[in-house]
């Protein structure tokens, strides 16, 4: 009985976050995609759930304006800002991303690991 409620709640949160992270982008420009190996960094089950519910809504879909998980080209420039800057963006909110990435149960350590995961280790 609990799983359907979680699934419905997750769907609702996903829809809200998709609308929050939309940005006008020029889809006519060709894009060169450099993907990191999928096995580079793994998350434990709890953090994988956090990623799926809170992060992948924008960071797992092209065209949202958010840097895509595992797409090194999206993270190269951002990595020069350093982990502390990225952590502040997550915790305070940045552009269309809500404060705490929408995960109010997450710790600073959770965010550090999720940023490392999405940036494929460019930010550690």
Image (cartoon, rainbow, N blue to C red):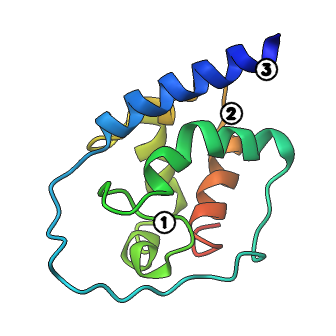
Residue 107's label in the rendered image is: 2
Q: How far is the residue under mark 2 from the one under mark 3?
A: 24 Å
Q: In which quarter of the image is the N terminus?
A: top right
Q: Pointer 1: what residue?
A: 82
Neighbour tally class for label 3: few under 14, some 14-19, many 20 plus, Cα within 10 Å:
few
Q: Look at the numbered disc 1 and give the secondary structure of its residue.
A: loop
SS at mark 3 in the image: helix
Mark 2 or 1, nearer chain start: 1
The answer to whether the residues at label 2 and label 3 have Cβ atoms under 8 Å apart is no
Q: In this image, 57 relative to 29: left or right?
A: right
44 relative position to 12: left or right: right
Labels 3, 1: front one: 3
Question: Who's the residue at 63% across and 73% down the image?
Answer: 120
Tell me the tag on residue 3.
3
Give the Cα separation between the discs numbered 3 and 1. 38 Å
Question: Is residue 112 depicted above or below 80 in this figure?
Answer: above
Q: Which residue occupies the foreground of this view, 118 or 16?
A: 16
């Amino acid at each position: 009985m609990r799983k359907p409620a979680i699934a419905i709640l997750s769907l609702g949160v996903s829809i809200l976050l998709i609308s929050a992270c939309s940005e006008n982008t020029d889809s006519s420009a060709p894009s060169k995609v450099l993907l990191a190996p999928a096995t580079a960094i793994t998350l434990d089950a709890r953090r994988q759930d956090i990623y799926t519910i809170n992060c992948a809504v924008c960071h797992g879909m092209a065209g949202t304006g958010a840097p895509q998980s595992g797409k090194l080209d999206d993270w190269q420039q951002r990595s020069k800002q350093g982990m502390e800057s990225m952590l502040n963006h997550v915790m305070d909110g940045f552009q269309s991303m809500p404060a705490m990435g929408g995960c109010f149960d997450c710790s600073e350590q959770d965010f550090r690991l999720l940023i490392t995961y999405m940036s494929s280790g460019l930010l550690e």
